Image: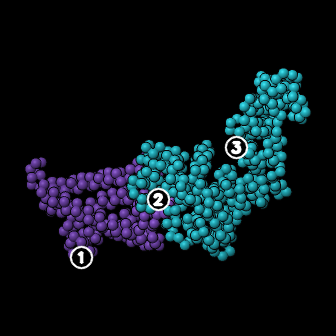
Amino acid sequence: MPEFLRRYGGQLADGLVDHVVLTAIAIGVGFTLSLILTLLIVRWRRLGGPIIAGAGILYTIPSLALFAVLVPITGLSLLSAEIGLISYTLLILVRNTLQGLDGISPDIIEAADGLGHTRTQRLLRVELPLAMPLIIAGLRIATVTTIGLVMVTAVIGEGGLGQVLLRGFNLRNWGIVYAALIVMIVLAIVADGGLGFAGRLLTPWARRGSR
Amino acid sequence: MTSASTSRAATVEFEHVTKVYGSGASKQGTPGAVNDLSLTVPAGKICVLVGPSGCGKTTSLKMVNRLIEPTSGRILIDGVDAATRNVTDLRRGIGYVIQQTGLFPHQTIGENVETVPRLLGWSKARRHERAEELLALVGLDPASYAGRYPAQLSGGERQRVGVARALAADPPIMLMDEPFGAVDPIVRERLQNEFLRLQEQLAKTILFVTHDIDEAIKMGDLVAVFRTGGIVEQFGPPSEILAAPASPFVARFVGADRGLKRLSLTRVNDLELAPAVTARVGDDAADARRRTLADPFAYLLLLDADGRPLGWVGQGRIPGDGVLEADLVETTSPLLDRRTTLKDTLSMLLDRDVQAGVVVDRHGVYRGLVNVDQIAAYMRDTARPFDAVDGPVTAVDLAAVSGEG
């Protein structure tokens, strides 16, 4: 075991760092985009159908196919990988955020208006905080899904731990294949738990009773 | 006195205000519609808008802070058309309390109360101080409540926080939409009483919506009875609405027991007190006996040396000579003060030997008598009942006037 770690530890660590970076960019950009899309829907309800449908179509494209289609356009690059990864986060994130905002009781919205919040103040001080539990839930699913999907981007030369795994596979080195997989699973569990914990810190009110 | 009591109230005038939903032929009688509403709420008064479900009372309320915009007509606040004002500024100057209170579940009680001061950009220290002051004002200990979340409070406590939040920036006007609708009757009664006491200090102009006529009568200085279609059938003080309903609808809406409701609104103060034959302990018995025998009422009211009533002495028990002693008293009557309601008075009198209440001032000194006949006469003389159209109240009628709006 120490021998294994000495030989492959560096590879695994590099792979892990790449993996985290790829995931973080995808979730960061995906979350920002989804927030913008959700706010567009909230403002102009008619956009809801097309946006959700668009995100749904992206979500149904098999990952391998999506990356293959992107390569002729954006090359074997980080950009290709991220476009694919981000695309997959949108449906989950938009749907959850929207559900979170729509689930707020009309009484609370009316109270916020009646007390004199501007539209932006209402969104920032009342609506987004109240949608937070569902936003966090969406982020957790999207993050775990993305961590898995990053493996696939190994086919276009990215992939973090996916590349480690692919190399091991080509060398028939099953030890490194399993090691890469285990590190990825641990990463997913830690990310999920971390987000869950952050969510609890952000929504102290949600634990103490129903809304 | 706290700063909560220092702001001026404002008058609120509805001028031919109409709200139409939808268009064309279907617009008549749409739930929530308001038809040519004109009424003035004087500064510092509670005006209750009451009526059956869908009668437009809540619509009328929400047009004041422009959560709903009128189709036509104007609402003037201290003479200024609400439609000409910046809508968020307008709302920050009007307290707003709704059923279930609409407290923000993600904010602590303290943060909830600080909402409007925060929107107005008050400093943190000033906001905190104000929140503590207000929580204390509505009877919640700031030290133990400010840090809690709404879900940790009882329904009654949440309603109090809702009132505190509405009062935070000391607005001259408060809009209250069924503010006590979501709590049980015992808590509701307590909240109503507390609120009335609070209003005595605050003297805000309050528009109060309810579907409960008893609440309307209790809370209102003025009551506007709405009929479906957003038409005000009657607008006036509660005593007038009970005594002289303007239409069969109002008569039915206030209920067949409106006579009893009037009793609880009318106070001993409103009656002309009857005189009794009185004498003080130590007075000449023969003179008292002679005066009592000359009076159709067969009892002498014996007072102590300071004029406080001791009780009744039957004419047969008054000695022919000597002086009056305290132990002659045979029976007593309930003591009333000028604020006692006729309902309470009547209830106290019905099972007594002497069916007269003795009215005393705040030093306990005798002032006069109230008897059952006087109450009956007063009620008769001040009423204009809708007997001809009253008729039996049918189940359909009851359905039409009950329920929420």
Q: Nearer the viewer, residue A125 or A151?
A: A125
Which residue is tagged 1?
Answer: A74
Q: Amino acid at mark 3?
A: Arg
Q: Characterize the local packing of mark 3: few (<14), some (14-19) or many (20 or more) Cα atoms within 10 angstroms.
A: few
Q: Residue at x 19, y 62 (%)?
A: A18
Figure label count? 3
List x then y, in percent, for residue B261. 73, 48
Q: Are marks 3 and 2 in contact (CB under 8 Å)?
A: no
Chain for mark 2? B
Nearest the camera: A45 or A51? A45
The chain letter under disc 3 is B
Query: Quick check: B287 left or right of B31?
Result: right
Residue B339 numbered tag: 3
Label 1's element? helix
| Chain seen in cyan | B
**Residue depicted at 72% across the width and 35% down the height:** B365
Question: On the picture, is A147 further left or further right than B175?
Answer: left
Chain shown purple: that is A
Q: Callout 1, which amino acid?
A: Thr
Could you tell me if residue B182 is visible in this image?
no
Q: Residue at x 78, y 39 (%)?
A: B368
